[in-house]
Image (spheres, rainbow, N blue to C red):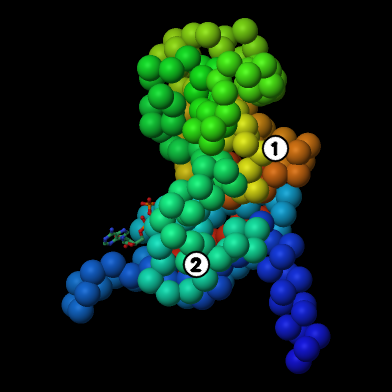
Amino acid sequence: MVESTVDTITAVRASALSLESVSRRHGRGDRETTALDAVSCAVPVGSFTAVVGPSGSGKSTFLQCAAGLDRPTAGTVRIGGTDLGALSEAALTRLRRDRIGFVFQSHALNLVPSLSIEENVVLPLVLAGADPEDERVLSRGRDLLTRVGLAGRGAQGPATLSGGQQQRVAVARALVTEPEVIFADEPTASLDPESAALVLGLLRDAVRIDGRTVVMVTHDPVAASWADTVLTMDGGRLR
Ligand SMILES: Nc1ncnc2c1ncn2[C@@H]1O[C@H](COP(=O)(O)OP(=O)(O)OP(=O)(O)O)[C@@H](O)[C@H]1O
């Protein structure tokens, strides 16, 4: 009994993300829908996980609850051992800013059009209080832009880039804080296969080279094939 408790605690600690019996219901009475139905899983540090499943199976809800963008109706979500349900809204906002990276579906939603590309990349650091003129901040932005194949383009605006290039900037920004988990919601949905492969390669490199943890929701079996682990959702449950 003691041993199994220790095993459980160890497993939770070694997980970048864990869900324990997480449910998310909407509405009440006859109109109640269960978007997520007692889902449990543990995502190890340094892994690439894809979440797949048919439309309406609960993938987005999984991601929203796992990333602290939505609060579950029941159950526990932990990022690096921190119970998100125990955090105030302000603390949850800080955790999302400092410990999580996001790449969303639409490149139009990912980047701030009025900022330059490099300002977009370092935005999470600046929001956390870093001086945007600090050489360390500027060089981190430049290094990440080089990494995503956009060296020398930092002073331009996002509108001067293609959709695929903008998604690569979004990946650079998601990496800038060295987050514990990067959540990607259909990051290749609007891209041609070649641009999609570049974005998926960057996510995979973040795992293989930097030991980051990536959780990606996708409809696309080709995109899912880049992951180490595929979680399949069906009717709000993990299959
Ligand atoms: N705010 C909401 N109010 C009511 N029902 C909701 C709400 N959000 C999601 N649902 C329902 O929960 C279920 C799961 O939705 P979710 O968006 O998580 O699925 P999904 O797998 O991401 O779908 P898709 O691939 O089409 O984006 C669906 O039946 C959906 O209609």
Whether residue 77 is situated above or below residue 211 in the rendered picture? below
Q: Nearer the viewer, residue 226 or 134?
A: 134
- Mark 1 to mark 2: distance in Å? 29 Å
Q: Which mark is residue 36?
A: none
Left or right: 79 in relation to 70? right
Q: Which mark is residue 86?
A: 2
Disc 2 marks a residue whose amino acid type is Ala
Q: Residue at x 54, y 32 (%)?
A: 129
The answer to whether residue 170 of the structure is visible from this angle is no
Q: Secondary structure at mark 1?
A: helix
Give percent across and percent down for residue 124. Answer: 53, 33
Whether residue 107 is situated above or below residue 216 in the rendered picture? above
Which residue corresponds to mark 1? Answer: 206
- Residue found farthest to the right: 3
Viewport quadrant of the C terminus: bottom right
Q: Nearer the viewer, residue 57 or 179?
A: 179
**Dot 2, how many residues are within 10 Å of its Cα: few (below 14), some (14-19), or many (20+)?**
few
Viewport quadrant of the N terminus: bottom right
The answer to whether residue 2 of the structure is visible from this angle is yes
Give percent across and percent down for residue 8. Answer: 71, 77
Give percent across and percent down for residue 188. Answer: 50, 35
Q: Secondary structure at mark 2?
A: helix
Q: Residue at x 50, y 23 (%)?
A: 120
Q: Nearer the viewer, residue 65 or 105?
A: 65
